[in-house]
Image: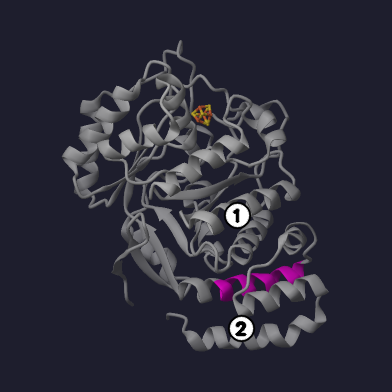
Protein backbone atom coordinates (compact mmCIF):
# COMPACT_ATOMS: atom_id res chain seq x y z
CA UNK A 1 0.00 0.00 0.00
CA UNK A 2 1.32 3.46 -0.83
CA UNK A 3 2.24 5.66 2.10
CA UNK A 4 0.12 8.80 2.20
CA UNK A 5 0.24 12.25 3.67
CA UNK A 6 -1.24 11.00 6.98
CA UNK A 7 1.80 8.75 7.40
CA UNK A 8 4.09 11.79 7.26
CA UNK A 9 1.80 13.76 9.59
CA UNK A 10 2.24 10.92 12.08
CA UNK A 11 6.01 10.98 11.63
CA UNK A 12 6.02 14.74 12.26
CA UNK A 13 3.93 14.37 15.43
CA UNK A 14 6.10 11.55 16.70
CA UNK A 15 9.36 13.38 16.04
CA UNK A 16 8.00 16.52 17.61
CA UNK A 17 7.10 14.63 20.77
CA UNK A 18 10.42 12.80 21.15
CA UNK A 19 12.86 15.48 20.06
CA UNK A 20 13.07 16.98 23.56
CA UNK A 21 14.51 13.67 24.82
CA UNK A 22 17.51 13.64 22.50
CA UNK A 23 20.78 15.54 22.25
CA UNK A 24 20.15 19.21 21.42
CA UNK A 25 22.10 18.96 18.12
CA UNK A 26 20.01 16.00 16.99
CA UNK A 27 16.85 17.82 18.10
CA UNK A 28 17.88 20.78 15.96
CA UNK A 29 18.36 18.48 12.93
CA UNK A 30 14.88 17.07 13.53
CA UNK A 31 13.31 20.51 13.88
CA UNK A 32 14.95 21.69 10.66
CA UNK A 33 13.83 18.57 8.80
CA UNK A 34 10.23 19.23 9.83
CA UNK A 35 10.36 22.83 8.64
CA UNK A 36 12.22 22.07 5.40
CA UNK A 37 15.37 23.95 6.39
CA UNK A 38 18.85 22.53 5.67
CA UNK A 39 21.09 21.52 8.56
CA UNK A 40 24.51 23.20 8.93
CA UNK A 41 28.06 21.82 8.87
CA UNK A 42 28.24 21.11 12.61
CA UNK A 43 24.93 19.23 12.55
CA UNK A 44 26.06 17.25 9.53
CA UNK A 45 29.23 16.27 11.38
CA UNK A 46 27.20 15.31 14.42
CA UNK A 47 25.12 12.89 12.35
CA UNK A 48 28.20 11.32 10.78
CA UNK A 49 30.29 11.08 13.93
CA UNK A 50 28.22 11.06 17.05
CA UNK A 51 24.64 9.99 16.49
CA UNK A 52 23.72 7.10 18.77
CA UNK A 53 21.52 4.17 17.64
CA UNK A 54 18.25 5.55 18.99
CA UNK A 55 19.00 9.00 17.59
CA UNK A 56 19.84 7.46 14.26
CA UNK A 57 16.42 5.79 14.10
CA UNK A 58 14.83 9.19 14.64
CA UNK A 59 17.09 10.81 12.07
CA UNK A 60 16.05 8.17 9.54
CA UNK A 61 12.45 9.24 10.05
CA UNK A 62 13.47 12.90 9.87
CA UNK A 63 15.29 12.29 6.57
CA UNK A 64 12.31 10.39 5.21
CA UNK A 65 10.10 13.32 6.18
CA UNK A 66 12.47 15.81 4.51
CA UNK A 67 12.48 13.57 1.44
CA UNK A 68 8.69 13.72 1.34
CA UNK A 69 8.76 17.53 1.67
CA UNK A 70 11.20 17.75 -1.25
CA UNK A 71 9.96 14.96 -3.53
CA UNK A 72 6.55 13.75 -2.30
CA UNK A 73 6.49 9.95 -1.97
CA UNK A 74 7.78 9.37 -5.51
CA UNK A 75 10.95 7.34 -6.14
CA UNK A 76 12.41 7.79 -9.59
CA UNK A 77 14.73 5.90 -11.90
CA UNK A 78 16.00 6.37 -15.43
CA UNK A 79 16.16 3.78 -18.15
CA UNK A 80 19.69 3.99 -19.47
CA UNK A 81 22.77 2.26 -20.84
CA UNK A 82 26.39 2.84 -19.91
CA UNK A 83 28.99 2.71 -22.63
CA UNK A 84 32.57 2.61 -21.34
CA UNK A 85 34.29 3.32 -24.65
CA UNK A 86 37.85 2.68 -23.43
CA UNK A 87 39.41 1.13 -20.34
CA UNK A 88 42.90 2.44 -21.15
CA UNK A 89 43.98 5.16 -18.77
CA UNK A 90 47.23 6.89 -17.93
CA UNK A 91 46.02 8.05 -14.54
CA UNK A 92 46.54 5.62 -11.75
CA UNK A 93 43.75 6.31 -9.32
CA UNK A 94 44.41 3.94 -6.46
CA UNK A 95 40.74 3.09 -5.96
CA UNK A 96 40.22 2.09 -9.59
CA UNK A 97 40.20 -1.51 -10.78
CA UNK A 98 38.65 -0.72 -14.15
CA UNK A 99 41.52 0.90 -16.02
CA UNK A 100 44.60 -0.67 -17.60
CA UNK A 101 47.77 1.06 -18.85
CA UNK A 102 48.22 1.72 -22.59
CA UNK A 103 50.60 -1.28 -22.89
CA UNK A 104 48.11 -3.79 -21.48
CA UNK A 105 46.77 -6.57 -23.72
CA UNK A 106 43.45 -6.13 -21.90
CA UNK A 107 43.12 -2.56 -23.14
CA UNK A 108 40.36 -1.68 -25.60
CA UNK A 109 38.89 1.25 -27.45
CA UNK A 110 35.44 0.71 -28.88
CA UNK A 111 35.27 1.42 -32.60
CA UNK A 112 32.47 3.86 -33.46
CA UNK A 113 30.63 0.99 -35.18
CA UNK A 114 30.47 -0.88 -31.82
CA UNK A 115 29.19 2.24 -30.08
CA UNK A 116 26.43 2.41 -32.70
CA UNK A 117 25.58 -1.25 -32.11
CA UNK A 118 25.33 -0.73 -28.35
CA UNK A 119 23.06 2.26 -28.87
CA UNK A 120 20.78 0.23 -31.16
CA UNK A 121 20.65 -2.56 -28.59
CA UNK A 122 19.83 -0.04 -25.85
CA UNK A 123 17.00 1.41 -27.94
CA UNK A 124 15.38 -2.02 -28.00
CA UNK A 125 15.18 -1.75 -24.17
CA UNK A 126 13.47 1.64 -24.51
CA UNK A 127 16.25 3.68 -22.90
CA UNK A 128 15.98 7.45 -22.65
CA UNK A 129 19.64 8.01 -21.74
CA UNK A 130 23.02 6.85 -22.97
CA UNK A 131 25.87 7.45 -20.53
CA UNK A 132 29.41 7.51 -21.95
CA UNK A 133 32.57 7.51 -19.86
CA UNK A 134 36.06 6.13 -20.33
CA UNK A 135 39.63 6.25 -19.17
CA UNK A 136 42.11 8.99 -20.01
CA UNK A 137 43.50 7.33 -23.11
CA UNK A 138 46.31 9.28 -24.85
CA UNK A 139 45.48 7.69 -28.20
CA UNK A 140 42.06 9.40 -28.27
CA UNK A 141 41.72 12.91 -29.59
CA UNK A 142 38.83 15.34 -29.83
CA UNK A 143 37.85 13.83 -33.16
CA UNK A 144 37.04 10.45 -31.53
CA UNK A 145 34.77 12.07 -28.92
CA UNK A 146 33.00 14.14 -31.55
CA UNK A 147 32.48 11.15 -33.84
CA UNK A 148 31.20 9.03 -30.94
CA UNK A 149 28.69 11.66 -29.83
CA UNK A 150 27.50 12.29 -33.39
CA UNK A 151 27.09 8.54 -33.96
CA UNK A 152 24.96 8.20 -30.82
CA UNK A 153 22.72 11.07 -31.89
CA UNK A 154 22.42 9.68 -35.42
CA UNK A 155 21.27 6.33 -34.04
CA UNK A 156 19.08 7.82 -31.33
CA UNK A 157 18.25 11.48 -31.93
CA UNK A 158 15.82 11.69 -28.99
CA UNK A 159 17.99 9.99 -26.43
CA UNK A 160 19.74 12.16 -23.85
CA UNK A 161 23.52 11.81 -23.97
CA UNK A 162 25.05 12.11 -20.52
CA UNK A 163 28.79 11.72 -20.34
CA UNK A 164 32.40 12.82 -20.11
CA UNK A 165 33.44 13.70 -16.59
CA UNK A 166 35.29 16.91 -15.65
CA UNK A 167 38.48 14.81 -15.81
CA UNK A 168 37.77 13.93 -19.45
CA UNK A 169 36.87 17.53 -20.29
CA UNK A 170 40.18 18.59 -18.74
CA UNK A 171 42.08 15.96 -20.77
CA UNK A 172 40.55 17.15 -24.06
CA UNK A 173 41.33 20.74 -23.13
CA UNK A 174 44.98 19.89 -22.38
CA UNK A 175 45.29 17.86 -25.59
CA UNK A 176 43.81 20.52 -27.86
CA UNK A 177 44.79 23.73 -26.09
CA UNK A 178 41.13 24.77 -26.13
CA UNK A 179 39.47 26.30 -23.08
CA UNK A 180 36.96 24.27 -21.05
CA UNK A 181 34.18 26.42 -22.51
CA UNK A 182 35.36 25.78 -26.07
CA UNK A 183 35.64 22.01 -25.46
CA UNK A 184 32.17 21.85 -23.91
CA UNK A 185 30.75 23.90 -26.73
CA UNK A 186 32.18 21.54 -29.39
CA UNK A 187 30.98 18.48 -27.49
CA UNK A 188 27.52 19.96 -27.04
CA UNK A 189 27.37 20.72 -30.73
CA UNK A 190 28.23 17.06 -31.40
CA UNK A 191 25.42 15.80 -29.15
CA UNK A 192 26.44 15.99 -25.48
CA UNK A 193 23.45 16.98 -23.33
CA UNK A 194 24.73 16.82 -19.74
CA UNK A 195 27.79 15.69 -17.82
CA UNK A 196 28.28 13.47 -14.77
CA UNK A 197 29.79 15.13 -11.73
CA UNK A 198 32.16 12.22 -11.31
CA UNK A 199 35.91 12.54 -10.71
CA UNK A 200 34.85 14.48 -7.62
CA UNK A 201 35.59 11.56 -5.27
CA UNK A 202 36.22 13.68 -2.16
CA UNK A 203 36.74 17.37 -2.89
CA UNK A 204 39.76 17.82 -0.66
CA UNK A 205 43.24 18.11 -2.19
CA UNK A 206 44.97 16.15 0.61
CA UNK A 207 42.60 13.22 0.19
CA UNK A 208 42.95 13.45 -3.60
CA UNK A 209 46.76 13.32 -3.42
CA UNK A 210 46.36 10.00 -1.66
CA UNK A 211 43.46 8.57 -3.68
CA UNK A 212 44.10 9.82 -7.18
CA UNK A 213 47.33 11.84 -7.39
CA UNK A 214 47.09 12.29 -11.18
CA UNK A 215 43.59 13.70 -11.16
CA UNK A 216 42.49 17.32 -11.41
CA UNK A 217 42.49 19.26 -8.15
CA UNK A 218 39.47 20.65 -6.35
CA UNK A 219 39.59 24.11 -7.95
CA UNK A 220 39.79 22.67 -11.47
CA UNK A 221 36.84 20.37 -10.81
CA UNK A 222 34.82 23.33 -9.55
CA UNK A 223 35.84 25.48 -12.52
CA UNK A 224 34.79 22.88 -15.10
CA UNK A 225 31.47 22.18 -13.38
CA UNK A 226 30.68 25.88 -13.04
CA UNK A 227 31.62 26.48 -16.67
CA UNK A 228 29.27 23.72 -17.77
CA UNK A 229 26.45 25.06 -15.60
CA UNK A 230 26.99 28.60 -16.90
CA UNK A 231 26.46 27.24 -20.43
CA UNK A 232 23.21 25.54 -19.43
CA UNK A 233 24.84 22.10 -19.35
CA UNK A 234 23.49 20.41 -16.24
CA UNK A 235 25.44 17.86 -14.22
CA UNK A 236 25.06 15.49 -11.35
CA UNK A 237 27.11 15.86 -8.16
CA UNK A 238 28.75 12.80 -6.62
CA UNK A 239 30.67 11.69 -3.58
CA UNK A 240 32.80 8.54 -3.28
CA UNK A 241 33.28 7.62 0.36
CA UNK A 242 34.43 4.73 2.53
CA UNK A 243 38.16 4.72 1.72
CA UNK A 244 40.52 7.11 3.56
CA UNK A 245 38.31 10.13 4.15
CA UNK A 246 37.12 11.27 7.56
CA UNK A 247 33.67 12.70 8.32
CA UNK A 248 35.20 16.20 8.30
CA UNK A 249 36.16 15.70 4.63
CA UNK A 250 32.62 14.60 3.82
CA UNK A 251 31.22 17.77 5.38
CA UNK A 252 33.68 19.94 3.43
CA UNK A 253 32.72 18.11 0.25
CA UNK A 254 29.03 18.72 0.98
CA UNK A 255 29.75 22.42 1.57
CA UNK A 256 31.51 22.83 -1.79
CA UNK A 257 28.62 21.14 -3.60
CA UNK A 258 26.07 23.24 -1.70
CA UNK A 259 27.88 26.49 -2.51
CA UNK A 260 28.08 25.64 -6.22
CA UNK A 261 24.40 24.77 -6.28
CA UNK A 262 23.41 28.02 -4.57
CA UNK A 263 25.33 29.88 -7.26
CA UNK A 264 24.41 27.93 -10.41
CA UNK A 265 21.38 25.68 -9.69
CA UNK A 266 23.00 23.33 -12.21
CA UNK A 267 23.10 20.05 -10.25
CA UNK A 268 20.30 17.64 -11.04
CA UNK A 269 21.02 15.29 -8.14
CA UNK A 270 23.53 14.27 -5.49
CA UNK A 271 24.74 10.70 -5.95
CA UNK A 272 26.10 8.55 -3.12
CA UNK A 273 28.87 6.24 -4.35
CA UNK A 274 30.34 3.97 -1.67
CA UNK A 275 33.87 2.77 -2.45
CA UNK A 276 33.90 -0.80 -3.84
CA UNK A 277 37.22 -2.05 -2.51
CA UNK A 278 37.61 -5.76 -3.28
CA UNK A 279 39.98 -5.70 -6.26
CA UNK A 280 41.58 -2.30 -5.80
CA UNK A 281 45.30 -1.84 -5.14
CA UNK A 282 44.56 0.62 -2.43
CA UNK A 283 42.74 -1.95 -0.34
CA UNK A 284 45.12 -4.81 -1.22
CA UNK A 285 48.05 -2.81 0.14
CA UNK A 286 46.18 -2.01 3.31
CA UNK A 287 45.92 1.70 2.51
CA UNK A 288 42.17 2.06 2.77
CA UNK A 289 39.16 0.90 4.73
CA UNK A 290 37.20 -1.98 3.20
CA UNK A 291 34.51 0.33 1.89
CA UNK A 292 31.87 1.86 4.12
CA UNK A 293 29.76 0.00 6.63
CA UNK A 294 26.01 -0.27 6.19
CA UNK A 295 25.52 2.06 9.15
CA UNK A 296 27.80 4.65 7.56
CA UNK A 297 25.85 4.39 4.29
CA UNK A 298 22.70 5.16 6.28
CA UNK A 299 24.34 8.13 8.04
CA UNK A 300 25.65 9.62 4.79
CA UNK A 301 22.25 9.27 3.19
CA UNK A 302 20.49 10.97 6.12
CA UNK A 303 23.14 13.70 6.26
CA UNK A 304 22.91 14.37 2.51
CA UNK A 305 19.12 14.64 2.54
CA UNK A 306 19.08 16.97 5.55
CA UNK A 307 22.04 19.09 4.41
CA UNK A 308 20.71 19.59 0.87
CA UNK A 309 17.05 19.99 1.87
CA UNK A 310 15.62 22.76 -0.33
CA UNK A 311 18.97 23.02 -2.17
CA UNK A 312 19.37 19.79 -4.15
CA UNK A 313 16.07 18.05 -4.58
CA UNK A 314 17.22 14.58 -5.61
CA UNK A 315 19.41 12.21 -3.59
CA UNK A 316 20.39 9.18 -5.63
CA UNK A 317 21.64 5.83 -4.33
CA UNK A 318 23.58 3.41 -6.49
CA UNK A 319 22.08 -0.07 -6.36
CA UNK A 320 25.15 -1.38 -8.23
CA UNK A 321 27.51 -0.34 -5.47
CA UNK A 322 25.26 -0.70 -2.42
CA UNK A 323 23.45 -3.82 -3.51
CA UNK A 324 19.75 -3.67 -4.20
CA UNK A 325 18.66 -4.45 -0.62
CA UNK A 326 20.58 -1.65 1.08
CA UNK A 327 19.71 0.74 -1.76
CA UNK A 328 16.06 -0.11 -1.14
CA UNK A 329 16.41 0.57 2.59
CA UNK A 330 17.98 3.95 1.90
CA UNK A 331 14.78 4.92 0.09
CA UNK A 332 13.35 5.21 3.60
CA UNK A 333 16.32 7.27 4.89
CA UNK A 334 16.16 10.25 2.55
CA UNK A 335 16.98 8.91 -0.92
CA UNK A 336 14.41 9.40 -3.69
CA UNK A 337 16.20 8.09 -6.78
CA UNK A 338 17.66 4.72 -7.76
CA UNK A 339 19.69 5.88 -10.76
CA UNK A 340 19.61 3.81 -13.91
CA UNK A 341 18.47 0.41 -15.07
CA UNK A 342 21.96 0.27 -16.62
CA UNK A 343 22.26 -2.80 -19.01
CA UNK A 344 26.07 -2.61 -18.70
CA UNK A 345 28.22 -1.51 -15.80
CA UNK A 346 31.92 -2.19 -15.96
CA UNK A 347 33.53 0.09 -13.43
CA UNK A 348 32.05 -1.18 -10.16
CA UNK A 349 32.17 -4.76 -11.38
CA UNK A 350 35.86 -4.51 -12.15
CA UNK A 351 36.33 -3.50 -8.51
CA UNK A 352 34.32 -6.50 -7.30
CA UNK A 353 30.70 -5.33 -6.99
CA UNK A 354 28.52 -8.41 -7.17
CA UNK A 355 25.17 -7.01 -8.28
CA UNK A 356 23.89 -7.94 -11.70
CA UNK A 357 24.49 -5.35 -14.42
CA UNK A 358 20.82 -4.85 -15.24
CA UNK A 359 17.74 -4.25 -13.17
CA UNK A 360 14.68 -4.24 -15.36
CA UNK A 361 11.96 -1.64 -14.96
CA UNK A 362 9.89 -4.33 -13.32
CA UNK A 363 12.64 -5.14 -10.77
CA UNK A 364 12.94 -1.49 -9.82
CA UNK A 365 9.19 -0.94 -9.68
CA UNK A 366 8.85 -3.90 -7.28
CA UNK A 367 11.75 -2.70 -5.10
CA UNK A 368 10.16 0.74 -4.78
CA UNK A 369 6.60 -0.49 -4.21
CA UNK A 370 7.83 -2.64 -1.36
CA UNK A 371 8.86 0.54 0.51
CA UNK A 372 5.34 1.96 0.20
CA UNK A 373 6.51 4.67 -2.21
CA UNK A 374 5.41 5.29 -5.77
CA UNK A 375 7.81 4.30 -8.55
CA UNK A 376 8.20 6.62 -11.52
CA UNK A 377 10.44 6.54 -14.57
CA UNK A 378 12.12 9.87 -15.31
CA UNK A 379 14.39 11.42 -17.88
CA UNK A 380 17.97 12.42 -17.08
CA UNK A 381 16.72 15.90 -16.17
CA UNK A 382 13.98 14.51 -13.91
CA UNK A 383 10.95 14.96 -16.11
CA UNK A 384 8.52 12.19 -15.16
CA UNK A 385 7.90 9.81 -18.07
CA UNK A 386 5.61 7.32 -16.37
CA UNK A 387 4.20 6.84 -12.89
CA UNK A 388 3.64 3.23 -11.88
CA UNK A 389 0.41 3.13 -9.87
CA UNK A 390 -0.57 0.24 -7.66
S1 LIG B 1 39.07 6.37 -12.05
FE1 LIG B 1 38.99 7.07 -14.20
S2 LIG B 1 40.73 8.45 -14.37
FE2 LIG B 1 41.11 7.21 -12.54
S3 LIG B 1 42.34 5.45 -13.25
FE3 LIG B 1 40.18 4.82 -13.31
S4 LIG B 1 39.53 5.26 -15.41
FE4 LIG B 1 41.43 6.43 -15.05
The residue positioned 62% from the left and 50% from the top of the image is 256
Furthest residue to the top? 103
The image shows residue 251 at horizontal and vertical percentages of 70, 53
Vertical arrangement, residue 112 with respect to residue 232, above or below: above
- Which dot marks residue 11? 2
Q: Nearer the viewer, residue 373 or 200?
A: 200
Mark 1 sits near ligand 1, with its Cβ under 8 Å away: no
Whether residue 54 is in magenta: the answer is yes
Marks 2 and 1: CB-CB under 8 Å? no
Q: Residue at x 60, y 35 (%)?
A: 278
The residue tagged with tag 1: helix, strand or loop? Answer: helix
Discs 2/1, front: 1
Circle 2: element type: helix
Asked if residue 128 lies left or right of residue 325, the reply is left
Q: How far apart, in angstroms, are the residues tagged by discs 2 and 1?
A: 30 Å
Quarter holding the N terminus is bottom left
Residue 259, numbered label: 1
Whole-percent x, y for residue 86 in the image: 38, 25
- The answer to whether 363 is drawn above or below residue 81 in the figure is below
Q: Residue drawn 41% across and 36% down?
A: 181
Q: Nearer the viewer, residue 324 or 316?
A: 316
Q: Earlier in the sequence, mark 2 or mark 1?
A: 2
Residue 163 image offset from top left, x and y in percent: 38, 40
| Residue 97 to residue 251: above or below | above
Magenta highlight range: 53-66
Amino acid sequence: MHVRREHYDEIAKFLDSVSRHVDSGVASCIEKSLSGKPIDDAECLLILKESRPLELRMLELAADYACWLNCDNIVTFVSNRNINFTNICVLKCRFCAFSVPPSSPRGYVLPISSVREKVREALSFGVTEICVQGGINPSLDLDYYVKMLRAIKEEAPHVHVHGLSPQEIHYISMKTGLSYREVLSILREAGLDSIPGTAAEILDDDVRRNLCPGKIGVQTWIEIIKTAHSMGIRSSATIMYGHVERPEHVVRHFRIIRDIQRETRGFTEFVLLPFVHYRTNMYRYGDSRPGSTGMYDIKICIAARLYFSGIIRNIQVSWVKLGRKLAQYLLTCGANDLGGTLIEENISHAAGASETTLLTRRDIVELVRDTGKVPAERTTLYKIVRVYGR
